[in-house]
Image (tube, rainbow, N blue to C red):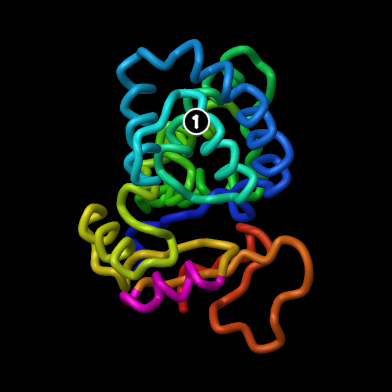
Amino acid sequence: MIRAIVTDIEGTTSSLSFVKDVLFPYARARLPAFVAAQSQSPPVRAQLQAVADTVGRPLTDAEASEQLIRWIDEDRKITPLKALQGMIWEAGYRQGDFQGHVYEDAVRQLRAWKAQGIALYVFSSGSMHAQKLLFAHTAWGDLTPLFSGYFDTTIGSKRETGAYLRIAQTVGAPPAEILFLSDVREELDAARSVGMRTCWLVRDGTPPADPPHPVAGDFDAIALTP
């Protein structure tokens, strides 16, 4: 029996293009000005220090901005970058510059699973703050009441086995009673290695001929029973 479902965002609940073509460019264009204007606020200062700690040397604010831009261009999953991106996106959501994209089939099934008493969680490389912002500002309204919790890279890499063990401990369910949804095989491999059920979302393109995980083209095709 599935007691909890943990879902990825990019390519799973939401379009890859929304993240790659809307959110990332938005934050990249505004990051230097944001750092310059907000560098003395404690939350921003803490993340700038985390940037310096990551590279292993002191950085000026301008150097930190340059490093963050490089990480964006390299598509790095680094915690202080994700935290600062989330702060910038918050202004964009509030100003109505964009809405969080969520597929209609994902919304429908998440609501159905919630009604069945299944606990829903998110695990994304984006910060927990950014995750909540996306689901709070969608064309379907505020979806955050559907979720019991959020996980980001502070719990571990999405390709790291230990992250899924820690998630199971936090959720409070045996791994075999947790279903993990993602569009990335390596993430699914890590989740399965600790005993979680898995489903590989392949929304575009053709799935492998002999997939190592159950495959679904959308949320309507996800099976909760073996």
Q: Is residue 98 above or below residue 123?
A: above
Q: Residue furthest right?
A: 205
What crowding class fits label 1: few (fewer than 14 Cα within 10 Å), some (14-19), or many (20 or more)? some
x and y percentages locating residue 88 in the rendered image: 54, 23
Residue that appears at 33% across and 64% down = 164
Left or right for 23, reference 87: right
Disc 1, SS: helix
Q: Is residue 123 magenta?
A: no
Q: Quadrant of residue 46?
A: top left
x and y percentages locating residue 92 in the rendered image: 61, 20
Q: Is residue 42 above or below residue 151?
A: above
Left or right for 71, reference 96: left
x and y percentages locating residue 199 in the rendered image: 53, 69
Residue 55 in view: yes
Residue 148 in view: no
Residue that appears at 49% across and 20% down = 35
Task: Say which quadrant the N terminus sits in.
Answer: bottom left
> How many numbered badges does the structure rendering display?
1
x and y percentages locating residue 118 in the rendered image: 37, 53
- Observer-nearest of 80 and 48: 48
Q: Is residue 223 above or below residue 4?
A: below
Residue that appears at 37% across and 37% down = 52
Which residue does the numbered mark 1 point to in the structure image?
A: 63
Residue that appears at 33% across and 31% down = 49
Q: Give the amino acid type for the residue marked by disc 1 in the picture.
A: Glu
Q: Which residues are magenta?
A: 185-195
Left or right for 62, reference 100: left
- Observer-nearest of 14 and 91: 91
Q: Quadrant of residue 205?
A: bottom right
Q: Is residue 194 magenta?
A: yes
- Observer-nearest of 189 and 41: 41
Question: Main structural element of the magenta stretch: helix, strand or loop?
Answer: helix
